[in-house]
Amino acid sequence: MPHDVIVAADFPHADALRDFLEKLPGQRPYLKVGMELFYGAGPSLVRELKDEGYSVFLDLKLHDIPNTVGRAMAVLSDLQVDMVNLHAAGGSDMMKYAIEGLTRPDGTRPLLIAVTQLTSTSQQMLEDELLINQPVDEVVAHYASFSKHAGLDGVVCSPREVEIVKEACGPEFLTVTPGIRFADSAADDQVRIATPENARASGSDFIVVGRPITASPDPLAAYLRARTEFLGE
């Protein structure tokens, strides 16, 4: 089963990303290209990164009617990315259309994972604003279960919910966990957070680390620290 540290490349344009990558000599990190960078730099940057040998998690969190998502996924699949995602709240029909759109003529496709609940979502927000009264970990496990049934490869969840997701969906069902902070890092706008060591102990398959690396005065040291704490390297 794959395990890796994914660096959240949350930059406004390609030059900012290139400046950051120059600070990681000798490294070729798995990169998460989210909305900010994708909207700022476009598909051409993704193609460049793939041509240069980077693994890319395209984090656009699609959520629309099934036909629209399926057609969009077909376009994204042509970028040859390694992983894409959508919002589980879009439902199982949307997920099935997404898989159909992602699958290339040769039968291959990127990994497809579903966002269960954002790591910025608290229990109070879940109840007061989304009108979901169940505990957040149960909600995440439920979303993961129907995502697996629809044919997805895994989910995005916080490290705190990995164990319950694995119990509900089995050990091979991937868990991609953002909200990672070093023990001495600020929480920022995240609520359900954990350290890389905590994530490893809980069974996370991938961790997504952003500002603790990208905003660090020494990004290389921070990246290597994340790999040591999560992968034991």
Image: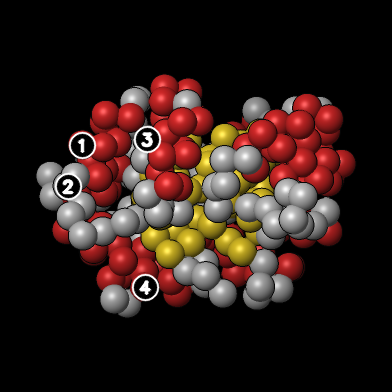
Image position, residue 75 (x, y; %): 67, 34
What number is the disc on residue 10? 3
In this view of the protein, can residue 64 be seen by the observer?
Answer: yes
* Nearer to us in this view, 25 or 213: 25
Q: Which residue is mark 1?
A: 19
Tell me: residue 1, above or below residue 106. Answer: below
Mark 4–mark 2 Cα distance, whole angstroms, equals: 21 Å
Drawn side of residue 178 relative to residue 96, left or right = left
Tell me: residue 161, above or below residue 117. Answer: below
Outermost residue toward the right in this view: 93
Of labels 4 and 1, earlier in sequence is 1
Image position, residue 72 (x, y; %): 70, 31
Image position, residue 215 (x, y; %): 22, 40
Q: Which residue is mark 4?
A: 231
* Nearer to us in this view, 138 or 76: 76
Q: Quadrant of residue 188?
A: top left
Of labels 3 and 4, earlier in sequence is 3
Q: Amino acid at mark 4?
A: Leu
In this view of the protein, can residue 190 be seen by the observer?
Answer: no
Instruction: Give the quarter of the figure containing the N terminus.
Output: bottom right
Q: Which residue is mark 2?
A: 23
Q: Provide the secondary structure element on which disc 1 rests.
A: helix
Mark 4–mark 1 Cα distance, whole angstroms, equals: 26 Å
Mark 3–mark 2 Cα distance, whole angstroms, equals: 15 Å
- The residue lying at 35 percent from left, 45 percent from top is 210
Of labels 3 and 2, earlier in sequence is 3
Q: Amino acid at mark 3?
A: Asp
Count of picture labels: 4
